[in-house]
Image (cartoon, rainbow, N blue to C red):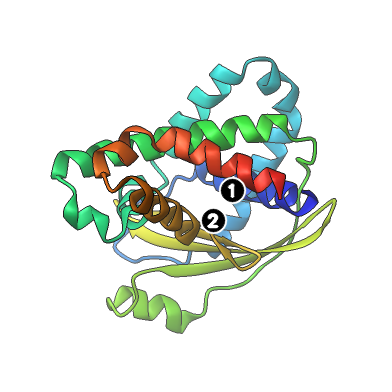
Amino acid sequence: MKRNKTFLTVLTMLFLQWSSAVFAEEQTIQSPQQDVETITRELLSTLEKNIDGYKKDSDAFIVEVDRQLSPVVAFDSIARGVMGKYSRRAKPEQVEQFSSVFKNSLISFYGKALLKLDDTRLTIEKVDAVPEAVLSDYKAGKARLVPVDMTVRTSSGIVAISYSMVHDDGRWKLRNIIVDGINIGIQFRNQFADAMSKHNNVQYVVDHWAEIMKGNAAAEDKK
């Protein structure tokens, strides 16, 4: 239970760090490392100062999270990855619906989870520089993502974070997160696949995704 709480805390806090990311449109793609560190520090400071107010008005907090995250997280791309092979079976309108459902359920779930946690203080230990070779491969189209590695300290210890970034519309966007070796994108994809194995109906899984997420979260909390 303690490990699950730490995992959820780190995932929620650092997922939200993309909320205030604004990058100028440039011909040359710069490394995301410094932006990641700056934005993370600023957001953690904001949360510490305003967490009491957020807890008193959770609906307003969810709206704010939505407003801030929408421009800087590649929700459509993440949603297609979560659907995996089933995105090819689905109709275009089902993929579009799932993208919207996935985004709304994820923002609501993690926003509310954050407000319930007491362990909201994180300290950045280190942000690793992105090797020039990695960035060059990305610019040349030889790599789909740019990883940005970070270590943070919580009340429970050190946690390793790896962000998978894509550069789109003149800014870096979050595509995936790995927390202490746990690949969040793969976890969601497994949840979708498990639901499809059980129900064998894309529309059913899309329509009930919020409940599926809640059910899996409840099961994890019991472990």
x and y percentages locating residue 50 in the rendered image: 71, 26
Residue 170 makes an appearance in the image: no
Q: Is residue 177 above or below residue 69?
A: below
Tell me the amino acid under the disc marked 2.
Answer: Asp
Q: Which residue is mark 2?
A: 35
Q: Is residue 41 above or below residue 48?
A: below
- In the image, taking residue 57 as reference, residue 48 lies left or right, namely right
Residue drawn at x 63%, y 71% is 128
- How many numbered marks are there? 2
- In the image, taking residue 150 as reference, residue 133 lies left or right, namely left
Task: Assign a secondary structure to mark 2.
Answer: helix
Residue drawn at x 26%, y 44% is 201
Q: CA distance from mark 1 to mark 2?
A: 6 Å
- Comparing 192 with 131, the one in front is 192
10 Å crowding of disc 2: few (<14), some (14-19), many (20+)? some
Quick check: marks 1 and 2 in contact, CB under 8 Å?
Answer: yes
Q: Is residue 146 above or below residue 67?
A: below
Residue drawn at x 45%, y 31% is 66
Residue drawn at x 61%, y 20% is 58
Tell me the amino acid under the disc marked 1.
Answer: Ile
x and y percentages locating residue 129 in the rendered image: 58, 73
- Comparing 198 with 135, the one in front is 198
Q: Which residue is mark 1?
A: 39
x and y percentages locating residue 150 in the rendered image: 64, 64
- Comparing 137 with 104, the one in front is 104
